[in-house]
Image (cartoon, rainbow, N blue to C red):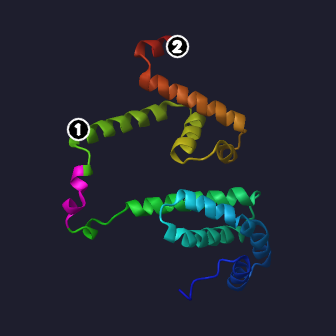
């Protein structure tokens, strides 16, 4: 435990200036990122179930942010730091879901067989997934992009607007149009759809 880096502001500033020779990035980090520590810790406590990993997550976020800032400084430190935190949590969740099959000697002991959906539910789920993919493919490209960024990647309207180089109002319109079209494809009577065309 003695090898663990300090988490105080002074300790972090000293750690970064020693390990990375970019004084401008270090100054930016100390000035813009470290004051967000309390809010960042609160975000991590609210969104991560394993309390013992919070400090490690915080350090990983700091490393990712500092590495990125040494290449290019973002316009909004707060947005960048919290986006980095969200991405890190998503990466961790994805990583935790991957369990090597040889890690479990007897899956029945864990009750995995009972929790798995039956063959009929798997077939229905695959069919619904295929229908959703077909419906998404039928959307206009910009609507589809906005829907995917919002519903699959979980970005906010502002983040979508920045990614797509459009205004937040246009994002709202694309999302509304996309949701309406998907609802029509899934729930409307086929005769109603043909009449609208």
The residue shown at (25%, 61%) is 110
Q: In the image, residue 59 lies at what x, y percent?
A: 60, 73
**Eyeballing the image, is 128 above or below 155?**
above
Mark 2 lies on a secondary structure that is helix
24 with respect to 103 (left or right): right
Please rate how many residues cluster around mark 2, counting C-alpha atoms within 10 Å: few if below 14, some from 14 to 19, many from 20.
Answer: few
- Measure the alpha-carbon separation of dots 2 and 1: 35 Å
Which residues, given as a range, are shown in magenta? 106-114
Q: In the image, residue 95 lies at what x, y percent?
A: 43, 63
Q: Main secondary structure of the magenta part?
A: helix
Label 2 or label 1, whichever lies nearer to me, is 1
105 with respect to 16 (left or right): left
Snapshot quadrant of residue 187: top left
96 with respect to 3 (left or right): left
Snapshot quadrant of residue 24: bottom right
Kindly identify which residue carries mark 1.
Answer: 120
87 with respect to 14 (left or right): left
Query: Is residue 74 magenta-colored?
Result: no
Kindly identify which residue carries mark 2.
Answer: 196
């Amino acid at each position: 435990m003695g090898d663990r880096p300090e988490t105080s502001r002074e300790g972090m500033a000293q750690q970064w200036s020693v390990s990375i020779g970019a004084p401008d990035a270090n100054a930016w980090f100390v000035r813009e990122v470290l004051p967000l520590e309390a809010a960042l810790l609160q975000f991590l406590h609210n969104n991560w179930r394993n309390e013992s990993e919070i400090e490690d997550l915080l350090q990983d976020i700091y490393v990712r942010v500092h590495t990125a800032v040494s290449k290019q400084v973002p316009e909004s430190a707060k947005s960048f730091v919290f986006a980095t935190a969200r991405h890190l949590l998503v990466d961790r969740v994805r990583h935790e879901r991957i369990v090597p099959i040889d890690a479990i000697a007897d899956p029945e002991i864990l009750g995995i067989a009972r929790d798995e959906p039956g063959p009929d539910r798997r077939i229905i789920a695959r069919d619904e997934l295929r229908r959703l993919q077909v419906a998404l493919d039928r959307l206009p490209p910009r609507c589809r992009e906005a829907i995917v960024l919002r519903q699959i990647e979980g970005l906010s309207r502002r983040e979508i607007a920045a990614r797509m180089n459009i205004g937040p109002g246009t994002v709202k319109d694309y999302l509304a149009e996309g949701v309406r079209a998907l609802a029509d494809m899934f729930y409307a009577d086929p005769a109603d759809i043909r009449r609208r065309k």
